[in-house]
Amino acid sequence: MSRKRTLRRALYTLSPWLATIGFFVIWEVGCRVLNVPPFILPTPSAAVAALIQYSDGIWLNASHTMITTLAGFALAVAFGIALGVVVGASPLLYRALNPLLIGFNSIPKVAMVPILVLWFGIGTVPAILTAFLVAFFPITVNVATGIATMEPELRDVLRSLGASKADILLRVGLPRSMPYFFASLKIAITLAFVGAVISETVASNVGIGYLMMSASATFRVPLVFAALLVIAAMGILMYAVAAYFERHFTGWATRSETG
Amino acid sequence: MHVTARTEKPADARFVHVHGASLDYGEDGEGFLALKDMSLDIGRGEFAAVVGPSGCGKSTLMKLISGLTPRSAGEVEVNGADVTRPLKIVGMAFQNPALLPWRTVLENVLLPIQVVRPHRSDYRVNKAPFIERARALLAKVGLAGVEERYGWQLSGGMQQRVSLCRALIHEPEILLLDEPFGALDAFTREELWGVLQDLWCERGFTVLLVTHDLPEAVFLADRVHVISNRPGRVIYTTDIDLPRPRTQEVCFTPRFVEYVHELRSHISQARQVI
């Protein structure tokens, strides 16, 4: 009875690892059994082999992509919060800017890359800006939502104390939007990766996106997949960091344990 | 123990003065009258209750007096001054305790201190006396020992006590209560009646209690006003002449029951008046 429960708990704890390992096992076995040629879909072991073989180049490009992503992400956080506060605190601006924001967010950002290249030339700057453009929107929307959904009673309480709009924003609006903000960071950081890699793929001569493009041009497909694995790993890492900050700063928002 | 009515100077009888006030929601002609020709006086230190069918504009009256919502017509005066913008001498509590979940109980109670002038600057310089005051108030409502807990870790009744403390910490002259005990179970509610009565007896602030619970109004108030269906106006007023401090026992006296019956019959009337 209790052994069964221990087993179930262990299964629950290990499930992410089991699922990930299972995924790669199926991939590996599938490729071998079906005899898929490595230039179509290499096995994960071949990808890992390429990863080791080209580790110097991958490391160089990956760290470049990481810096690009973080720069775009930092811009997105700063701009996203500022716009979110403005839009969330003013119903007028919320209404006025809504169509613009939605319209802008609907544009595939890959379509912006050529324009950015036109303005800033090929290289890191368009990649940073693409990461920024992709990532700021969820931050803005979440911060604005957190501020705009303030309980009307709280607003009344504060107004009846003579609180200014800035007071209300500072004491209630911003703190209560923090869980929304941290939740959006997890989305934004992964989106920033997408933006940076897309831009590098299209218009750069450095970065993991560029590495993938040049590898596939020379049919080094295992290297392409090695790069994909690295991107995925970096994404998971950054997500974990964002999730850690979320738990650390807004633990009160997860009110499961009542004392 | 019989406590005689508070001695009032004539000017204080109209500490809160509402006369012929109306409120029209919605601008473009499709007017939605929430209040019409509302007249009501509350003396300084009086405990007034307003009862009426739901949606009759009871809460609107509260917002009018607090200055949160400007009236469309008529007079609203508090302490002889026309109310044109949010008053700063009021404390408010609602059915929803609306505590800030990221603040401890103590920090929640201190919120008004951090906002209201001149306390906010004093608080920045020297926090200790205010923290002491908050602790004392919490202890008075039976919440000693939970200061460092979070609101969401407390029961509904305890949260409402915190909400009361937050409404009173800056020692407002008027306490506005909008169905503060509406979401609580009967026992907790009656317990809180006692807590509120004690605070009021001790501090002598003026109260406007909005409720649909008739025994609650009779138990707590000096005077009860019945408001008609929308558009709301006062259709009946009665003084509650029961000795204070009132205890749970009073609820079973014939006088008490009579008051409740009387109000009940006027409410039934109020629901028909359109």
Image (cartoon, coloured by chain):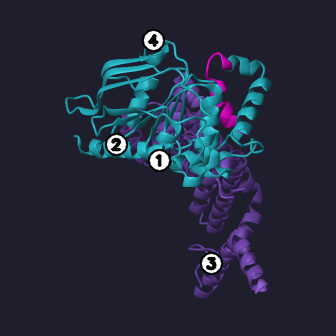
Chain colours: A purple, B cyan
Residue ID for mark 1: B254
Q: Nearer the viewer, mark 1 or mark 4?
A: 1
- Magenta highlight on residue B66: no
Determine the CA span between mark 2 and mark 4.
Answer: 29 Å
- Magenta highlight on residue B108: yes
Nearest to N terminus: mark 1 or mark 2:
2
- The chain identifier of the residue carrying mark 4 reads B
Where is residue A115 shown, x and y percent of the image? 45, 38
Residue drawn at x 76%, y 87% as measured from the top left: A1
Three-letter amino acid code at disc 1? Pro
- The chain identifier of the residue carrying mark 2 reads B
The secondary structure type at the circle numbered 4 is: loop
Q: Nearer the viewer, mark 2 or mark 4?
A: 4
Three-letter amino acid code at disc 2? Gly
Residue A187 in view, yes or no: yes
Where is residue A197 shown, x and y percent of the image? 58, 51
Residue A178 in view, yes or no: no
User: What mark, if any, has residue B55 been given in the picture?
Assistant: 2
Determine the CA span between mark 1 and mark 3.
Answer: 83 Å
Determine the CA span between mark 3 and mark 4.
Answer: 82 Å
- The chain identifier of the residue carrying mark 1 reads B
